[in-house]
Image (cartoon, rainbow, N blue to C red):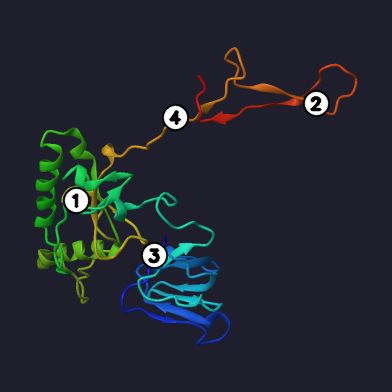
Amino acid sequence: MIDQIPVGATVSSSSGVGAQTSYITPVNVAVAFSDQQVVQFYTTAGVNRGGTATISYVDGPTNTLWFSTALPAGVAATDYIVVAGATYGTGASILGIKAWDVNSNSGTIAGLNRASYPGRLSTPTINLAGAAITPGIAQRAEVLLGRALGPDADSIKSGIWYGPPEQAFAQSNLMYNVQIANAQEIHGDKTLDMAKKSFADTFGGRKYHKSWTAINNRMDLLVLDNWYIGELSPLELYDFGGGNVVAPVPDISSTNGTASYLTSHMFALTNVRGE
């Protein structure tokens, strides 16, 4: 899934011609899509709307998707926009931050029932109800992080903020509110430029990782030292025997009755361990 059509969005199919045959506005993050990308649509119940649609171009500033084709019948707000060819559903997708960072003890994640592990599979959330962030938010998050991992956990130090540029803009406004200029050092007849060219790199002393495809109404504190890749068996080079992981390539076209080999070699990767 790339995005979910927001409630209240306008979904217009076959209302124009050419590159503007259909459109959806606004989506959450239009820049997560690309021009000429082919997508398909699923309902919140996981029902495929059928067919695909081709994005003619993406309008990032207005979060609008323009299509050169008609949309599948029934596409509506709250539908999921999915990569064409993907099998949407449980176990068939790569879960993102919004799937893992959920403040709930119900439902499942990674095949585990959250209710069976109260608190352990739930992510604490600070709900500002749409209000602007304040400097104290960083310390409130630090309190929750310490309660979850313990104040002496080394992994706490690795936490970074992840969010959209809109949140970085809000952080910049915090700085402007307390900025002081020394008028004695101002020369010339032009007004002092009080704005900075770029966003701040940190928030609350932690690195702020700015992403143009992140959801614009939230930011997440991610402790990357606690992230792991789960695997049933490690990926490794195949052993052809005697510890040899590279083997010559036999010449199957040889007809002289003797073994012959090409002037190339081969290797293989495997994640299934035989006993």
Picture quarter containing residue 98? bottom left
Q: Observer-nearest residue: 261 or 167?
A: 261
Q: Which residue is mark 2?
A: 251
* Relative image position of residue 101 (x, y in whole percent): 25, 52
Q: What amino acid type is highlighted by mark number 4?
A: Ser
Neighbor class of circle 3 (other Cα within 10 Å; few <14, some 14-19, many 20+) is some
Which numbered disc flags the more N-terminal residue, 3 or 4?
3
Q: What amino acid type is highlighted by mark number 2?
A: Asp
Which numbered disc flags the more N-terminal residue, 1 or 2?
1
Which numbered disc flags the more N-terminal residue, 1 or 4?
1
Q: Nearer the viewer, mark 1 or mark 2?
A: 1
Q: Observer-nearest residue: 233 or 177?
A: 233
Q: Observer-nearest residue: 85 or 44?
A: 44
Q: Nearer the viewer, mark 2 or mark 4?
A: 4
Q: Which residue is mark 1?
A: 105
The circle drawn on residue 74 is: none
Which numbered disc flags the more N-terminal residue, 2 or 4?
4
Q: Which residue is mark 4?
A: 233
Label 1 residue SS: loop
Tell me what residue is drawn at x 81 percent, y 20 percent: 260
Label 4 residue SS: loop
The circle drawn on residue 3 is: 3
Q: CA distance from mark 1 to mark 3?
A: 24 Å
Label 2 residue SS: loop
For this view, does 174 lie left or right of residue 260? left
Picture quarter containing residue 211? bottom left
Q: CA distance from mark 1 to mark 4?
A: 30 Å
Tell me what residue is drawn at x 14 percent, y 44 percent: 145
Label 3 residue SS: strand
* Relative image position of residue 270 (x, y in whole percent): 54, 30
Neighbor class of circle 1 (other Cα within 10 Å; few <14, some 14-19, many 20+) is some
